[in-house]
Structure formats: C-alpha cells, structure tokens
Amino acid sequence: MSTTRQLVLSCFKNLHRACGQVFGNDYKALIEARKKVNEEFRKNLQLNNEDEIKEKIQFGDDACEFLKTMVIQAEGDGKNSFKLNITKDTTMLENVSYDPEAVDKAYENKKKQRKTKK
C-alpha cells in the first residue's frame, strides 16, 4: 500500500475517532459529522495530484485537531443549565471576568491623553 494511501486512510480514521470523542453522547450530531467526513472523502476520491492530496490530508488533520481541542458538547440537564463534556484534549484558556468599569476607565484615559497632546 502506498504511503499516500496510508496517510489518507489514517486521516479518515482519525476524523471518525475525533467525531466519536466529541459527539459520542449526541447520536444525531455524531451521525451528521460522520456523514460530512464520508461526503468530503468521496468528493475527493478522484484526486490524482500528490500535492492536492497532501493539502487535503493536512486540512483533514487540522479539522481533526480542531474538533478535539475546540469543540465542546453541552447537554441540558433540565434545570435551565448545561453540563459541558470536556475531554483531556480540550484547550483550556484563562477566563477573565468582564469589568464594565475597566472600559469606562480606558475611555477616560484616552480622553485625557488627547487633551494633553493638544
């Protein structure tokens, strides 16, 4: 089996695994995600150009990484709140609380700077 074919099959399997990891508890979303993966691979089945194939593989690998790190599935718990299904691969960033006074202070500081320049 050629190396390119192995890379394509690996990408295909990885995308399906990522879909299962992210949408495992949501059967409808899982089916739709898998349909989309299959559709895109079928659409590009006739590609012969090695560079185009590698470009598509890279796109698939990026999509796989995005799914695993950036997509969070939320489930309603019936109490007007949601449970987030966060995995070990989910990217966690520092959250900063919104402070409306900080916006006002920044605006006032800019006004003072403009006055002092005149």
Image (tube, rainbow, N blue to C red):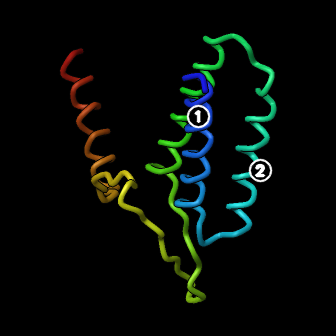
- Asked which secondary structure carries label 1, the reply is helix
With 28 as the anchor, is 3 left or right in this view? left
List the residue tagged with mark 2.
Answer: 35
User: Residue at point 52% right, 54% down?
Assistant: 71
For the residue pair 74 and 29, the one nearer the viewer reads as 29
Which quadrant does the N terminus fall into?
A: top right
| Residue 80 - label | none
* Outermost residue to the left: 116
Q: Position of residue 116 (x, y in %)?
A: 18, 21
List the residue tagged with mark 1.
Answer: 60
With 15 as the anchor, is 28 left or right in this view? right
User: Residue at point 47% right, 69% down?
Assistant: 85
Q: Position of residue 101 (x, y in %)?
A: 29, 54
User: Residue at point 73% right, 14% down?
Assistant: 48
- The three-letter amino acid code for the residue at tag 2 is Lys
Res. 90 image quadrant? bottom left
